[in-house]
Image: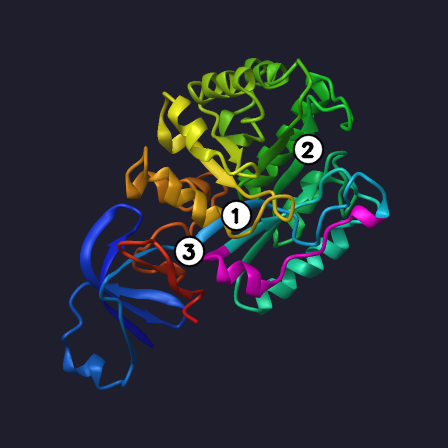
């Protein structure tokens, strides 16, 4: 058991200075814990004076077993460790494949996710890759039958390296995800890599016109350029949450341009193409234009809502105890608690 005292809690909504009780990996209580019976259990007490406490960060787009590189085999990037993630304040990850689904495989990725779960992280997986590979022969079956799989991604659109789906074919993939989500309670989301081709997001507008639920679509890399980002903003007004990668570490530039509902934005690292620890760093830079609640929601509450990760993304009684303590003045990382550890 842990008792965390004297910290300013952002859940990410502000709760003020309060006390958190953690037991069995969950947040047991928020508020007064002066009861002698509780203290008699001899819990570990953490003094969070001078700190803010926020939910553990969620990285919904990360290449956990490394990227293949596109300059030959020697350009492949290494995998990501639990130690790297925790040192960056990231406690939940959703791993994926990209261009290479030959030397980087879904079985390897699934094994990596299981290993991270054994090490205390909350880890999930997108089935797919650019060319929509699957483990069972069916995207729908993967989501329904394999616990760790929450949806399909990163399926490529508007990219010369992609399969170049027509709207009908992509709608079928989205429908498979959606149906699997309704049957399992999982996200059932089609997570879409958006490339640099001039068609941009036109195929997603077609899918919406065909009746695909907007909550089933989650395009990423929508901040490649301003015309693409403007189209993505328009999609948020139709109910689609968009994801900004922070590879170039220029998040504030895009946030200044955004004039829509801020809850419709998420961010991710695309690590190891981007840096694992850039997630927290970029959130801190976002405090120039967003409140603490809005900035941290980009990688906590907003992501958890889109991905239906119901037990993370917020500090609330009953949820998984994923907590990040930051210096209240400098926002330097002081302590990470993942699943109560």
Alpha carbon of mark 1 to alpha carbon of mark 3: how far? 10 Å
**Residue 8: x %, y % from top left:** 22, 57
**Residue 144: x %, y % from top left:** 64, 46
- Residue tagged 2: 155
Q: Quadrant of residue 304?
A: top left
Q: Earlier in the sequence, mark 3 or mark 2?
A: 3
SS class, disc 1: strand
Looking at the image, is mark 2 or mark 1 nearer the viewer?
A: 1
**Residue 322: x %, y % from top left:** 41, 60
Left or right: 197 as drawn, with respect to 184: right
**Residue 314: x %, y % from top left:** 35, 51
One can see residue 325 in this view: yes
Alpha carbon of mark 3 to alpha carbon of mark 2: how far? 27 Å
Q: Quadrant of residue 147?
A: bottom right
- Residue tagged 1: 59
SS class, disc 2: strand
Near mark 2 (Cα within 10 A), the count class, few <14, some 14-19 or many ≥20, is many
Q: Earlier in the sequence, mark 2 or mark 1?
A: 1
135 part of magenta stretch: no
């Amino acid at each position: 058991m842990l008792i965390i005292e004297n910290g300013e809690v952002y859940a990410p909504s502000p709760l003020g200075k309060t006390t958190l009780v953690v037991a069995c990996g969950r947040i047991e209580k928020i508020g007064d814990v002066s009861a002698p019976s509780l203290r008699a259990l001899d819990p570990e007490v953490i003094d969070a004076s001078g700190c803010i406490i926020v939910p553990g960060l969620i990285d919904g787009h990360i290449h956990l077993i490394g990227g293949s590189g596109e300059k030959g085999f020697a350009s492949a990037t290494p995998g990501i460790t639990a130690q790297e993630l925790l040192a960056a304040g990231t406690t939940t990850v959703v791993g994926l494949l990209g261009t290479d689904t030959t030397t980087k495989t879904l079985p390897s990725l699934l094994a990596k996710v299981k290993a991270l779960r054994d090490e205390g992280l909350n880890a999930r997986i997108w089935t797919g890759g650019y060319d929509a590979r699957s483990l069972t022969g069916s995207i729908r079956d993967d989501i329904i039958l394999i616990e760790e799989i929450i949806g399909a991604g990163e399926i490529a659109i508007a990219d010369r390296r992609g399969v170049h789906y027509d709207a009908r074919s992509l709608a079928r993939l989205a429908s498979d995800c959606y149906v699997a989500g309704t049957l399992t309670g999982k996200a059932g989301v089609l997570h879409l890599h958006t490339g640099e081709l001039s068609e941009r997001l036109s195929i997603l507008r077609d899918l919406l016109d065909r009746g695909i639920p907007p909550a089933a679509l989650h395009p990423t890399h929508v901040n490649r350029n301003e015309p693409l980002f403007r189209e993505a903003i328009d999609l948020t007004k139709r109910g689609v949450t968009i994801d900004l990668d922070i590879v170039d570490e220029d998040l504030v530039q895009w946030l200044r341009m955004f004039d829509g509902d801020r809850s419709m934005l998420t961010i991710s690292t695309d690590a190891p193409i981007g840096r694992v620890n850039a997630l927290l760093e970029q959130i801190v830079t976002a405090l120039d234009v967003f409140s603490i609640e809005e900035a941290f929601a980009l990688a906590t509450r907003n992501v958890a809502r889109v991905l239906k990760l119901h037990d993370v993304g917020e500090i609330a009684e009953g949820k998984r105890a994923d907590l990040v303590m930051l210096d209240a003045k400098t926002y330097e990382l002081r302590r990470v608690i993942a699943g109560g550890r």
